[in-house]
């Protein structure tokens, strides 16, 4: 996911991210309304029919087999000799199982990459992904029309193209948080926070007034991954970026060990205060994604780092809620908005794929028309979804009334040119799908770090971050007591060598921009 809401997200976004913004959204200029004129669809029946195995996180929807059959039938009818097959990996095992697949030369083709979790650069450095630039040139005319050049820059390095980016949202929305005005008003908090201190004080008031068994804890999606953009606006050193969870990149081009910075210490102090005041889940380090999804979807929080998710589920918790009850805010709102990632979510082709062109052909077909997009993203009209107006969509749920019969997460593979929107979308959610004309792009937004020169050290350092640094950051471990031995472990793991290589590559990147 999603650093944040942005930033980034898990399967809880199924409904909200399939919903949309106001105004007419046109197809990409020059995009064909069918697939017959697409060079990638010029295959003949004599060509081999290739099965594209797509590996992604989450749980397989009930009606995926029926949708898969319909998609594959249309692919062949449109002259694309590719058949799609999905392999879902449970969120709790995603990183481990994907790494095992990559290291054991498992037979699959395309997989999803969340740059705010494990970056595309990490996979490039491990030799785990293919350069698909030639395939895009040959088979991807619709991809090039549907995805802006600025977003493509996020997957290119040294003239090579290592993935197809999902152009599904406005990156400048990162840094926002959602305020639950219902709970705030109930606790007597009239103004939304503009500082970290005000945020903690507001949460404390709400928690003190909530007597229910389910507390509105501050939900943290991914620990080190999604909190930073919201909190960092408070610091004089902003804007800066944290890459790969280890490298702190300043606005003047310096690279430091993230855990050694004052900014890390300040973040940790915020979460330590929240943890001690019981404002975050006491099981924050081990809470399951499904638990977070349930809490976030229900709107049971005072503040959420990012945008809200499922408006229908939220109305189960707050039947009388209005659009203005959940608002999108920023700490220090007068500071500029920045795009820290131009391509947060991308789909890469595994190095061991025998048919890299199949992934490009499929994605080009997906973005060739609204009809193709609707079929793969929403399923079978009348069976898994209903169209509402020109750009709306209503999911059809299973017998439980909550679980969509089929849904493909927009944030994994969606495109703003085609996204259909939940008619109940909250105003706070619409910011995801609207361009921010005043936003600035951080100079290192498209910077790739290639860890191949420090491969062993990088793996060791990231392991220490998970085991020793994350408990400090999340406030479970006291900073003053735990940071020294943790930093010693990082030194032993090779952090200095990694940061030196980071600096070397960032210097070269900056020089290339002149």
Image: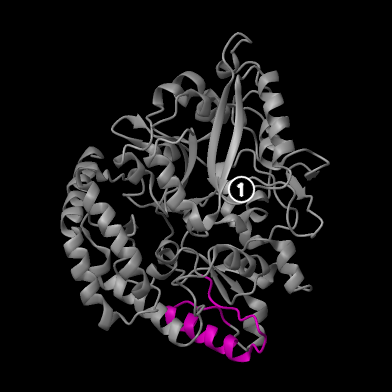
The way the protein has been coloured in the rendering is: one colour
Q: x%, y% of residue 491?
A: 17, 64
Secondary structure of the residue carrying tag 1 is loop
Q: x%, y% of residue 460?
A: 26, 57
> Is 504 on the left-hand or right-hand side of 198?
left
Asked if residue 48 is among those painted magenta in the image, a careful observer would answer: no
Q: x%, y% of residue 166?
A: 52, 41
Residue 423 sits above or below residue 221 on the image: above
Residue at 23% across / 38% down in the picture? 512
Which of 21/401 is in front? 401
Tally of numbered discs = 1
Question: Counting other residues with Cα less than 10 Å from the Cα at mark 1, is it few (<14), some (14-19), or many (20 or more)?
Answer: many
Residue 490 sits above or below residue 123 on the image: below
Quadrant for the C terminus in the image: top left
Question: Residue farthest to the front?
Answer: 104
Which of 138/456 is in front? 456
Residue 424 sits above or below residue 361 on the image: below
Q: x%, y% of residue 325?
A: 68, 72
Residue at 43% across / 52% down in the picture? 96
Residue 68 sits above or below residue 443 on the image: above
Which of 10/248 is in front? 10
> Is 36 on the left-hand or right-hand side of 250?
right
Residue at 42% across / 61% down in the picture? 225
Q: Is residue 281 visible?
A: yes
* Tag 1 residue: 409
Residues in magenta, as a range: 191-219
């Amino acid at each position: 996911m999603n650093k944040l809401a942005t930033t980034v997200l898990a399967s809880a976004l199924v409904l909200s991210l399939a919903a949309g913004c106001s105004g007419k959204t046109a197809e990409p200029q020059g995009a064909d309304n069918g697939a017959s004129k697409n060079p990638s669809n010029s295959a003949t029946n004599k060509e081999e029919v290739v099965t594209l195995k797509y590996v992604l996180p989450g749980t397989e929807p009930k009606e995926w087999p029926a949708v898969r059959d319909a998609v594959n039938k249309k692919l062949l009818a449109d002259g694309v000799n590719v058949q799609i097959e999905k392999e879902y990996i449970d969120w709790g095992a995603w990183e481990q199982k994907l790494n095992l697949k990559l290291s054991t030369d498992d037979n699959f083709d395309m997989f999803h990459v969340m740059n705010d979790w494990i970056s595309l650069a990490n996979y490039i450095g491990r030799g785990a992904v293919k350069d698909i630039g030639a395939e895009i040139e040959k088979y991807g005319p619709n991809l090039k029309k549907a995805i802006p050049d600025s977003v493509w820059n996020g997957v290119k390095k040294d003239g090579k193209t290592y993935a197809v980016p999902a152009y599904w949202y406005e990156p400048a929305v990162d840094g926002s948080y959602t305020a639950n005005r219902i709970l705030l008003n109930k606790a007597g908090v009239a103004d939304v926070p503009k500082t970290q201190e005000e945020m903690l004080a507001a949460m404390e008031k709400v928690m003190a007034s909530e007597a229910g068994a389910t507390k509105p804890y501050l939900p943290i999606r991914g620990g080190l991954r999604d909190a930073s953009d919201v909190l960092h606006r408070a610091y004089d050193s902003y804007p800066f970026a944290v890459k790969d969870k280890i490298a702190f990149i300043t606005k003047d081009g310096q690279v430091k060990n993230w855990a050694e910075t004052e900014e890390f210490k300040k973040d940790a102090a915020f979460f330590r205060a929240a943890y001690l005041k019981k404002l975050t889940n006491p099981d924050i380090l081990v809470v399951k994604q499904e638990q977070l999804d349930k809490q976030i979807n229900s709107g049971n929080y005072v503040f959420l780092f990012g945008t809200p998710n499922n408006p229908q589920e939220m109305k189960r918790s707050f039947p009388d809620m209005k659009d203005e009850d959940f608002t999108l805010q920023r700490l220090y709102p007068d500071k500029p908005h920045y795009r820290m990632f131009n391509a947060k979510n991308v789909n890469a082709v595994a190095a061991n794929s025998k048919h890299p062109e199949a992934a490009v052909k499929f994605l080009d077909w997906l973005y060739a028309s609204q009809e193709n997009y609707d079929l793969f993203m929403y399923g079978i009209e009348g069976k898994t979804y209903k169209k509402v107006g020109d750009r709306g969509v209503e999911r059809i749920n299973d017998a439980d009334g909550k679980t969509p019969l089929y849904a493909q997460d927009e944030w994994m593979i969606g495109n703003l040119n085609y996204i259909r929107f939940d008619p109940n979308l909250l105003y706070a959610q619409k910011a995801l799908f609207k361009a921010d004309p005043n936003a600035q792009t951080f100079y290192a937004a498209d910077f790739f770090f290639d860890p191949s020169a420090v491969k062993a050290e990088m793996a060791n350092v990231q392991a220490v971050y998970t085991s020793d640094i994350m408990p400090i950051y999340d406030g479970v471990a006291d900073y003053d007591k735990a940071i020294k031995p943790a930093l010693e472990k990082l030194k032993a793991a090779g952090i200095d060598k990694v940061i030196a290589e980071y600096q070397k590559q960032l210097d070269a990147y900056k020089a290339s921009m002149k």
